Amino acid sequence: MAITTQISQPEWQALEKKRVVFGHQSVGGNILNGVERLAAKYGVNLDIHEQRTAPAAKGISHFFIGNNGDPLSKIKDFATAIDAGAAQNADVAMMKLCYADFNAATDARQVANAYITNLESLAQRHPETNFVAITAPLMAVQTGPKAWIKRLIGKQPNGYVDNLRRAEFNTLLRERYLSTGRLFDLARAEAGSTGKYCMAQVGDQAVETLCPDLTNDGGHLNEHGQELVATNFLSFISSLATRQVVAK
């Protein structure tokens, strides 16, 4: 996924034809805040509705899923909503986990396998909708004197190992979906939208991190981050095919 810095007129025109369903938690809300500001800035009428029912009009229908810290609850909740009709008539359906769903103890492979299995099962049950994967969002890592002291006494600064688990999950999603065009790489947008690529060294592995310029609290997106990530989100959605009606 190439990093995008602005939405073109043809992309806006493509977006106006789409029905998108989006299950998420707080970072998803950050992205949608950015979408609203971009639409206002460009004078585009892009409707955003919070609902779990089938989208009646073009635009983005979204709803909160599961509980932060419990990724399997989000996977199950999204499937329940879709099977109950939340994606009926939708061109695209997508589900995002949160940075809070990963910590040093997380079995990232187990979470990825559950996520992929669920997404593919939904795609089989609802073939008229394009189901899209989203990489997990990142966190900024601790730097400065406190981080230096922790390293000096043999401890990892805050955020490093947690981002390693997110990287493990994201790698598995990229391996499964990147070549298919069915992956919005949120982690890449968070790490690379500022013109530099934000990375941290965890042992002998370099992992992506949320660029500090895009956040005020280390995890959620500030206004600048919201607009940059929303630009990539919208550009990606505009590139996806519209709904194909399946004969019954």
Image (cartoon, helix red, strand yellow):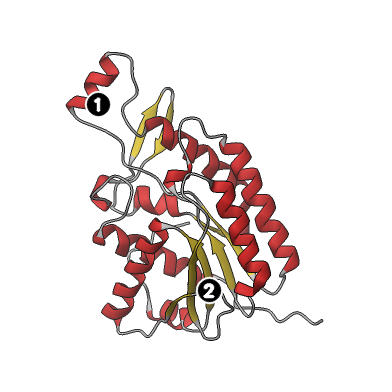
Residue 144 percent across, percent down from the top left? 19, 30
Q: Amino acid at mark 1?
A: Ala
- Which corner quadrant holds the C terminus? bottom right
Under circle 1, the secondary element is helix
- Density class for disc 2 (Cα within 10 Å; few <14, some 14-19, many ≥20) is many
- Regarding residue 148, the answer to whether it shows in the image is yes
- Density class for disc 1 (Cα within 10 Å; few <14, some 14-19, many ≥20) is some
Which of the 4 image quarters holds residue 210? top left
Give above or below for 194 relative to 232. Answer: above
- Regarding residue 181, the answer to whether it shows in the image is no
Q: Which mark is residue 20?
A: 2
Q: Residue at x 57, y 34 (%)?
A: 107
Assess whether mark 1 and mark 2 are in contact (beta carbons under 8 angstroms).
no
Of residues 240 and 145, the one nearer the viewer is 145
Under circle 2, the secondary element is strand
Q: Amino acid at mark 2?
A: Val
- Residue at the top extreme, as displayed: 153
Q: Is residue 241 left or right of residue 2?
A: right
Q: Residue at x 53, y 79 (%)?
A: 18
Give above or below for 53 relative to 180. Answer: below
Give above or below for 234 relative to 65. Answer: below
Q: Which mark is residue 147?
A: 1
